[in-house]
Image: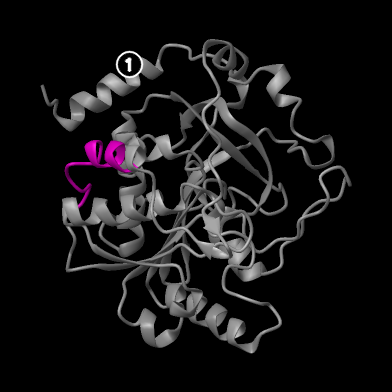
Amino acid sequence: MIRPLAAVACLLFATCAVAQDSTVLLKEKTVPSPGRPQSIKDGVQIQKSQLEDYVAMLDNLPLTAPAKPKQARKLLILCKAAGFFHSSIPLAAETVKAMGEKTGAYTATITYDSADINAANLANYDGIFLDSTTLEFLGDPKDPVTDARKKALMDFVRSGHGIAGIHAAGDTYHTVPARDSGLKPEGTWPEFNKMIGGFFKFHWVYPQPVWVKIDDPKSPLTAMFHGREFEVHDEIYTFLQESFSRKNVHVLTSVDYSKMSAEDKAKEPAATKRTDGDYALSWIHREGKGRVFYEALGHSEHIYAMTPIMTHVLAGIQYTLGDLPADDAPSVK
């Protein structure tokens, strides 16, 4: 029997209301999965996802868009990574494309070439989606062409267009100190760092269980969660305290830090540990006349088969395209 989307969502969150296994128990109950290689081979990014992941995604796509588009929308999905090449990149791209096609929210073009970020090409689009782009994803910082791409990106958003990003879109444009050096990462493109909302410093490794708190239950971007916390396993990003602030962004969801075990809390390096216990996962804000959405989940392929989370991402994209109005004032004034 095929259940309506709402019923599927209720089933999912009813399941999530039950405490899930810790990482230790998961390992005791299972055999290790085959290792997923990074999505790059011989210096070329792999552009196809695994069959099982792709089918699971197709079977769990949102059925309808949160908003009716005001006009035909076009989205450019950029998959170029310059650091870690997440295995989920091809699947994320196909998921975002398929969501737009199935719901009528937008049509999308997928590219793995950062050269497509130029003023002439961007004139054909209403928004950009950054698919786990890592580090200097627009090219060599010493190359004048890269400077032109950076300008094109910022001008595009600030002039009234949208930009959305998932997972490693927040692991971009920062230094990478040695793990045990005690040094903090530093931003290398301040304009972008502020626009995307912060940059990566540490993650709890997959399959870390966390409870996701709904910070703004009244937002149309969180309506699919029905105001209820839920538990999920993923690789959980944290952001340098100096780079992320609720004075800059409107937080939608975050880690319920109070529900993390003392053991898991202790895994975060003391040298860069947040002192405020604030581990936001998704947010929106304005950049000039444009709009920004970011979602930190998305390391693991199974996230792209979780209908409520993908509906949340779809709502975020529609917000950036200007089709889903939402309160985007900073969470702290």
How packed is label 1: few (under 14 Cα within 10 Å), some, or many (20 or more)?
Answer: few
| Any part of residue 248 in sight | no
Measuring 61% from the left and 70% from the top, which residue is drawn there? 191
Residue 56 is one of the magenta-drawn residues: yes
Q: Nearer the viewer, residue 89 or 61?
A: 89
The answer to whether 329 appears left or right of 179 in the picture is: left
228 to 285, vertically: above or below: above
Measuring 37% from the left and 34% from the top, which residue is drawn there? 217
> Which region of the structure is painted magenta?
54-67
**Whole-percent x, y for residue 203 in the image:** 65, 39
Measuring 76% from the left and 56% from the top, which residue is drawn there? 176
**Whole-percent x, y for residue 31 in the image:** 53, 18
147 to 220, vertically: above or below: below
The answer to whether 305 appears left or right of 42 in the picture is: left
The N terminus sits in image quarter: top left
Residue underneath mark 1: 14
**Whole-percent x, y for residue 294 in the image:** 47, 52
| Any part of residue 299 in sight | yes
Residue 291 occupies quadrant? bottom left
Q: What colour scheme was applied to this rendering of the protein?
A: one colour
Residue 237 occupies quadrant? top right
**Whole-percent x, y for residue 161 in the image:** 37, 71
Identify residue type, mark 1: Ala
Residue 290 occupies quadrant? bottom left
Q: Residue furthest front?
A: 42
Q: Which SS class for mark 1? A: helix
Measuring 53% from the left and 11% from the top, which residue is drawn there? 29
Residue 77 is one of the magenta-drawn residues: no
218 to 25, vertically: above or below: below
